[in-house]
Every structure is written in structure tokens, then in C-alpha cells.
Image (cartoon, rainbow, N blue to C red):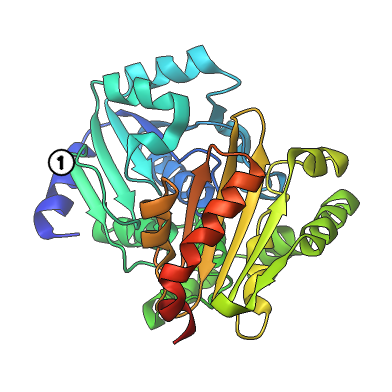
Amino acid sequence: MNFEQIEALKELLSTSKRIAIIPHKNPDGDAIGSTLALWHYLTKKGHRADVLAPNDFPKFLKWMPGADQIINFERNNSETKKRITEAELIFTLDFNDFGRVGQMSESLQNATAKFVMVDHHQEPSDYATVMYSDVSMSSTCEMVYNLISYLGDLDLIDKDIANCLYTGIMTDTGSFKFKATTSKTHRIIADLMDKGAENTEIHHRIYDTNSPSRLHLLGCALKNMVILKEFNTAYITLSQEELDRYNYEKGDTEGFVNYGLTLEGIRFAVIFIENREEGIFKISFRSVGEFSVNDFARKHFDGGGHHNAAGGKSERNLEETISYFTSLLPQYKTALTQ
């Protein structure tokens, strides 16, 4: 974030404003952590802020301080639209294109407010007055920490803000193991712990709290795993019928795709999850090394994300989706096996 952008943001926040803070659809730990941390901070600064989420988020994130104040667009459509219309400033966090907020996109496109983007994904759209976009960052939560620092307010980070930021950084770095985790990331984590972040309790709430149905669903997913040794690739499928059988709740499949990468020699892991209501298969891609799943997802599955973690979708049925996916692999064999 350069000097001009910092000064522009300071000017925008120099007087009390009505502010909307927006995460992407199907928000994860980084999206919820960053929006809630920013909400706490802006409220402390005297602004009237709201977090407006396109839809619901996983139960394992609902302990986070302020989570009960998030307004859900799917459940409170008219109220969410009203808050967007009234907003003088809108922060979009952890996404960089209105297409990532589903049916909320029309409201954002029609908004009269100025926009501030804070995001670490590739190829941002040009809609923000102030754009803090950095693909080298581990997480949007790390960027929100930097943002507060740029504004000279690190002393305002309290236990609630620290817990929110720690959660987002931890989840988006795979518990600090992904390549984007830097020495600066760890220094920020240390400061958050000094400011009250409860690292052990956060880890327990995110990773160690399971329902029997989620574990049964994981068993089903692992049973469905297919290993393509020729391409150092593993994929998992979950049909709507299987999700229903094991009483799927939002967030239950979080992390399932990563099991493929625990296999020796596997460089590319994928999970295909049916969403009958939307008429699509949602796809998560993960890789290790130099193979870019962001490029793969953008080129073939209307998606994108990061170099080693991305998402996409398919409107084909399962058989056609898998057939199409496997037909693509030969052209990537060298990249996956060298």
C-alpha cells in the first residue's frame, strides 16, 4: 500500500461515516476474521459499521467476537440492501471482483459509496477508490493488521481484534505451513498473542471440534478418493445424496481436499462437491510446488485464487465433470511429474 493510498484512506476515515464491510460468498476463516477485525476497529474509531455477508458461514467460526452481529443477505435481504444503499464507504475484504458475492453483486454495483478493496488474490477488478491488493500476503487478515498499522493505530488492537486476525491468518496459512507464511507473518502473530490472541483455544475451536456426522462424511470422502499416479494427482467426489446422508452443514467439508496432498508423491489434489440447489459442482484445487492451480482453475473451471490454492465450478454432471477434468491432465503431465 503506497503513501498516496494511505493518505486517501486516512482522509476517507477522517470523519464519522456509515460503513459496510463485505466478505465473499461462502466466507471462510480469513473472510470472517478480517471483516470482524475491521468492524471492531472502525467501531472503536467512531464509525457506524456493519458486516454484511452474502450468505451463512460455518458454525466453527460463530464463536468469534462480533459474529452474532453479522447481517446475512440471504436471510435479511431487504435490510442488507438498505445498509448498502445508506453506506458512505464500503470495504470489500478477501475478494476482488463483485462476482464473488453472488446475488449481492447488483446492490454493490448500484451503490453510491466509495469502495476500499483489501485483498490478496490475483487479477483484481478496478472498482475501488482505494485498493490494497498484494498477492504475496499470507491472508487478508495480515493485510488488515498492516492497514491498522499504516493508520497508526496498532495500540487499538485489543483481545477481540487479535483473536479475529489470528484466526484468519492461521486458517489461510494452513496453520502457518503454506509458502506465503513469512517471518513477518510470524512477527505479526507474536504481536497478536501479546495483545491477547488465544492461540491454543482458537486452534481447538477451528480444528478439534467435530460432529459425528462430519467424521462420517470425511470417511465417505476418503473412500471416494481416486489416485492418478501417472499425473501425481488425487481427487475426491461428494454427491448431494452423500452430503444429505451425513447431514452436511456449511463448513463440514473444510480441509477435505488437503488429504490428497498428504499422500506420498501427490502434487495436485482436487475435491468435487455437488450443490444441487445451484446446479453446479463446487471444486477446490490444491497443489504443492510450482504447479499453479490458480491458472488451471481460471482456464478450465471459471475460477481462480492463489498459486497453490484455488476454487472453481462445473455445470456438468459428475461423470462429465470428472471426464473433462481427467482429459485435461495429459497436457499438464510434465508440470505435474518433473
Quarter of the view holding residue 92? top left
Identify the element where label 1 is drawn: helix
Question: 287 or 109, which is in the foreground?
Answer: 287
Tell me the residue at 32%/69% (across/down). Answer: 136
Query: Which residue does the numbered mark 1 point to in the structure image?
Result: 11
| Residue 188 in view, yes or no | no
Answer few, some or many: residues within 10 Å of disc 1's Cα (few below 14, many 20 plus, some between 14 and 19). Answer: few
- In which quadrant will I find the N terminus? bottom left
Number of numbered callouts drawn: 1
Task: From the top left corner, tell me how far across and down residue 100 is, in percent.
Answer: 42, 38
Question: 124 or 85, which is in the foreground?
Answer: 124
Report the side of 176 relative to 21 (left or right).
right
Tell me the residue at 69%/42% (across/down). Answer: 250
Report the side of 245 relative to 49 (left or right).
right
Task: From the top left corner, tell me how far across and down residue 179 is, in percent.
Answer: 44, 78
Tell me the residue at 58%/48% (across/down). Answer: 321
In the displayed structure, would residue 190 be above or below residue 198? below
